[in-house]
Amino acid sequence: MGADMVIAAVRSHDRMAREIEADIAALTAEQAAVIFHTVNGESYDYLYDEGNDEFDSELEFVQDHLTRALTAIRNESRELTYLHMGGVHLWITGGMSWGDDPTELFQPFLYAEESGFF
């Protein structure tokens, strides 16, 4: 058993942070559930039930991860590197992993990438 190099990247098309914040705040529980289950490799084949507490907790979880990713990008965290190519910003985090997340931002970036908000 050895270590693997893993990375997560978020593309940004010059969207303003306040636009992304508005998208995060407007995220519905159903959208959050789809993002949550996609990132975790699970199928989203059950019906959305508005009264389901699981959806509410997934909404809070996903919103928290998206906010953490946005805050890290704004503050140019040391856990990130940045590339600019043809009008697209690419924020990258990652590193060596022995089965765990290589950085604190790895999971938030997976959610940010799946959301499509950035």
Image (tube, helix red, strand yellow):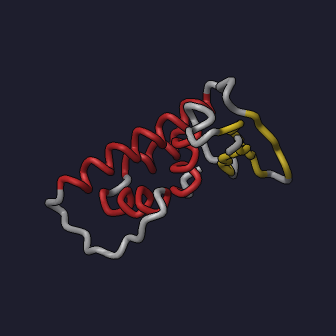
Q: Note whether 29 is above or below 65 in the view shown.
A: below
In front: 30, or 102? 102
| Residue at point 69%, 45% (across, down) | 6
Q: Residue at x 70, y 32 (%)?
A: 80
Q: Nearer the viewer, residue 110 or 6?
A: 6
Q: Is residue 76 visible to us here?
A: no
Measured along the vertical axis of the image, is residue 93 above or below residue 38? above
Which of the 4 image quadrants contains residue 61? top left
Quarter residue 92 falls in? top right
Count of numbered labels shown in the rendering: 0
Q: Where is residue 78 drawn, in percent x and y?
A: 69, 23
Identify which residue, 4 or 86, lies in the foreground. 4
| Image position, residue 23 (x, y; %) | 45, 50
Q: Percent x, y for residue 45?
A: 34, 76
Q: Quadrant of the N terminus?
A: top right
Q: Residue furthest left?
A: 51
**Height in image: 55 above or below 71?**
below
Furthest toward the right, the residue is 86
The residue depicted at 48 percent of the width and 43 percent of the height is: 66
| Residue 95 shown left or right of residue 98 in the figure | right
- Do we see residue 15 in this rendering? yes
At x 85%, y 49%, the residue is 85
The picture places residue 41, in percent across and down from the top left corner, at 48, 63
Left/right of residue 64 with respect to residue 87 in the rendered view: left
